[in-house]
Image (cartoon, grey):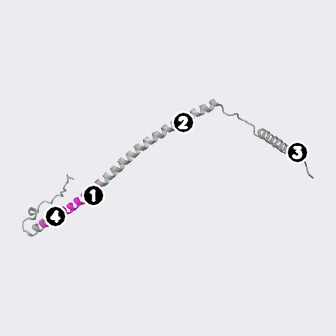
Amino acid sequence: MKVDSRIRRGLVLVGVAGSLLTGAASIRAAAQWTAASAPLAVSPASAESLATRLADEEARSAALQAQIDKLRSGTSDLTVALDAARTQITTDTATATAMRTRLATAKARLAALEASIASARAAVAARGAGGGGSSAAAAPAPLAPTHEVETGG
């Protein structure tokens, strides 16, 4: 069975047109169905309210930027203070080391002086015991402890 090419073309055109119409009708029905199921309950914001909100947000942003700048300034002040404290700690450490050295030297000198005083007392006591005179007259008064004070660095 052969169908004439003109009839065949006509049937194809009718089929394509019917498909296009069916597609358009289904798209329109889907759009109406979507619009019916999701209506706009709240109207969109007006341009004036958006401009007001934008101005509010810009003011808030400027305030936050001022706070950030203040924090940066405070941070730089704290950094300077921390550097000064580190320098002071270094200086104090060096001073403490020098003082420990001076203290050790002073203790050694004090020990030597105390040993010298003890030997002098022993010599005086030995003279008084073996010398034959009155022990009260021969014994000198006990020596008071002496401490040397360093004034130089």
Q: Earlier in the sequence, mark 2 or mark 4?
A: 2
What residue would you read off at disc 3? 6
**Nearer-the-camera pick, 121 or 97:** 97
Residues shaded magenta: 95-123
| Residue 3, horizontal then vertical, whole percent | 91, 49
Give the farthest residue toward the left.
133
Residue with the mark numbered 4: 116
* Magenta-span inclusion, residue 8: no
Question: Dots 1 and 2: beta carbons under 8 Å?
Answer: no
Secondary structure, mark 3, is helix
**Is disc 2 placed on a helix, strand or loop?**
helix
Label 1 packing within 10 angstroms: few (<14), some (14-19), many (20+): few
Q: Is residue 110 magenta?
A: yes
Q: Quadrant of residue 22?
A: top right
Magenta residues: mostly which secondary structure?
helix
Q: Between label 1 and label 2, give the one nearer the viewer.
A: 2
Q: Measure how far apart labels 3 and 4 are at the Cα level.
A: 143 Å
Residue denoted by label 1: 100
The three-letter amino acid code for the residue at tag 2 is Arg
Q: Is residue 63 above or below residue 107?
A: above
Circles 3, 4 touching at the beta carbon (< 8 Å): no
Q: Residue at x 34, y 50 (%)?
A: 87
Where is mark 2, residue-wise? Answer: 60
Q: Is residue 129 left or right of residue 70?
A: left
